[in-house]
Image (spheres, coloured by chain):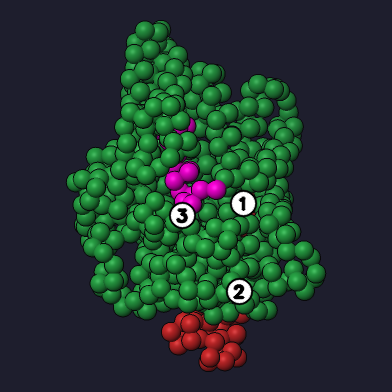
Amino acid sequence: MGLDIRLPIGGLFTVLGLLLAGYGLVSEKALYERSLGINVNLGWGLVMLIFGVIMIVLGRRRTGNGEIRRSQVTQQRPDSSNH
Amino acid sequence: MNLTTIDWIIMLVYFIFVLGIGFLLKRKVKTSTDFFLAGRAIPAWVCGLAFISANLGAQEVIGMAASGAKYGIATSHFYWIGAIPAMVFVGIFMMPFYYGSRARSVPEYLRLRFDEKTRGLNAISFAIMTVFSSGISMYAMARLIQTLHILDAPFRRMSFPPQWIFDVSILFSALVVLAYILLGGLSSAIYNEVLQFFLIVAGFLPLVWLGLKNVGGWHGLTERLPRAYTHSWAGMSNPNTNPLGVEWFGLVMGLGFVLSFGYWCTDFLVVQRAMAADSMSAARRTPLIAAIPKMFFPFLVILPGLIAIALPTQLLPVASTAAAQSVPSAGEGLIPAKMDETGRPRLDQNGKPVLDYDLAIPNMLLHYFPTGILGLGLTALLASFMSGMAGNVTAFNTVWTYDIYQSYIRPNASDAHYLFMGRLATVFGIALSIMAAYAATRFNNIMDMLQLVFAFVNAPLFATFLLGMFWKRATGHGAFSGLVSGTTAAALHHGLTLSAGAAPGIKGAWLGSVLHVYPSEMAQNFWTAIWAWTTCFVVTILVSLMTRPRDEKDLVGLVHSLTARPSEENVPWFKRPAILGALVLAMTLLLNLVFW
């Protein structure tokens, strides 16, 4: 598989995290009555953002065992256009 | 339901990623192996997450919270007695034969081990079941979108008639799943399942956190609820003293042994995820890795149900089928009563309102989540429906193409032809699911209905696999007659018994007489499974002993005693299946003790 799964996961969480946290910053306080007064958009958005960035970093470093093995294999074969 | 722009953007972003994965993987699909088995090139942890995510469909997210609200923490038996031991067993003992035999599907293993008719029976019943399950997922999702009035406002704005909401929801979810499977095949389904897994966790974790904070933590929950709701083994010595209405033996044997092993060890929907792994060792680790997040799922999917029932009954603009807002609800906590046509709560035989437990999760989302994160929660809910659907569709297209089409309709065609057939099967599989969705029935608890279907078809299956893999004397005639008589026994048992308070018909006793009345529907289902399994086990042995055994040399790689153990010399200890399995079981035991 040429695509490291952590990249799309990281991408999705980064985008969603930014959206939520950004919305949390601009939204009114009254909105958070139902969530016990906690700005869950900001808080959880930041958590998702951090998770997303970590996944992207891990995915780009290709530290997973499976990926190392396969990327080595593809490097040995110059005709492969996987990367 | 007040969705704002931010909620719609979140949903849109999710769908862009889902389809994007399909497009990115499209160029990898060149052969039928790429399409049906993901080229057998997926790392273990990815397969592991897909393994549980494929099962994380409607029946799990909605059904488990519903059961949590109905039965309490005892629902966790579906995990801690049910799923986990079975997942450990399939990883350690069965995967060597599934993966090692190079079978491309579970029915194909049956053909290699037994004979054509056993495969045919399994393939056809399995194909029907997947279409049915994926139809239920679709139906449940469309109903939920309708009930929560998610699409009402946009429909009004575009002046579409609101009756179309159900149809549009079904069509839209079908098209999304169709698109990404057609593009990337099993890899695309697996990648999306992993994505959905993380999204479901991200959507429900803050919900559980807020809910627990609100009721004063686990301790607060135990004070608000009856004792049996927060102690999973309370009153299990007698069916009349616990909420499930089943005694420990029926629970451990029926749910733990027969049903769960039948599902997790033989259902191609989940086994297919492990078969896509990049090596034997990765395939064996797949269910074991999956078991670790799986054992914590009760906190994610059952706890919301407990919290929903523990909260004070409130006047909320909660979802109810009657569109009236803030009616003094006859429900309990956040769970509304089911309404009849006149808008009054439906009552059971004791005059108590019948609760619509399936709304536990949706109402929790609406109760705690402000706009923004509400979009995330709803997206997670949609994701769970889609992963359930996609799992079924990918299993269906493989079994159809390899086990039915290639075997009985057109053998010896080119690989490109089977790849084409797989794509075609995806299209008509989804079309059949849509039909099943429209035919879907009016059960309160989705879980109960699926359990019933699984009991008839799946319960005897595990006996067949157990004997096939561990007793070299078992024969094809034995396996086939065992399966047929096991399923017949299930149907007979269900047709001659009833659960307390149920009317004869779909709930049992449809053969005219009632031989036994069980204290609960669940007990009846578990015992149906036990009867089916035992009948299959005994009949398979008897018929096998009367028929001619197969040559031992034909069974190498298919039966335990004739197969070399997979070498573990170069595998570090933390990757060895036996050690991982023991670890998983120890943790599960601990969880059982903590919530005793």
**Of helix, strand and loop, which one carries label 2?**
loop
* Mark closest to the chain's N terminus, 2 or 1: 2
Label 2, residues with CA under 10 Å away: few <14, some 14-19, many ≥20: some
Mark 2–mark 1 CB contact (< 8 Å): no
Q: Chain of mark 3?
A: B
**Residue that badge 2 annotates:** B1
Give whichever of B81, B368 is nearer the camera.
Answer: B368
Question: Which quadrant would residue B471 be assigned to in this image?
Answer: top left
What's the CA distance linking mark 1 and mark 3? 14 Å
Label 1, residues with CA under 10 Å away: few <14, some 14-19, many ≥20: many
* Mark closest to the chain's N terminus, 1 or 3: 3
**Of helix, strand and loop, which one carries label 1?**
helix
**Residue that badge 1 annotates:** B138
Residue drawn at 74 percent across, 59 percent down:
B164
Question: Which quadrant would residue B475 be assigned to in this image?
Answer: top left
Magenta residues, start to end: B442-461
Judged by its main secondary structure, the magenta piece is helix
Q: Is residue B59 above or below residue B150?
A: above
For chain B, the rendered hue is green
**Does label 3 lie on the same chain as label 1?**
yes
Q: Chain of mark 1?
A: B
What amino acid type should be assigned to the residue bearing mark 3? Gly
What amino acid type should be assigned to the residue bearing mark 1? Met
**Residue that badge 3 annotates:** B63
* Mark closest to the chain's N terminus, 3 or 2: 2
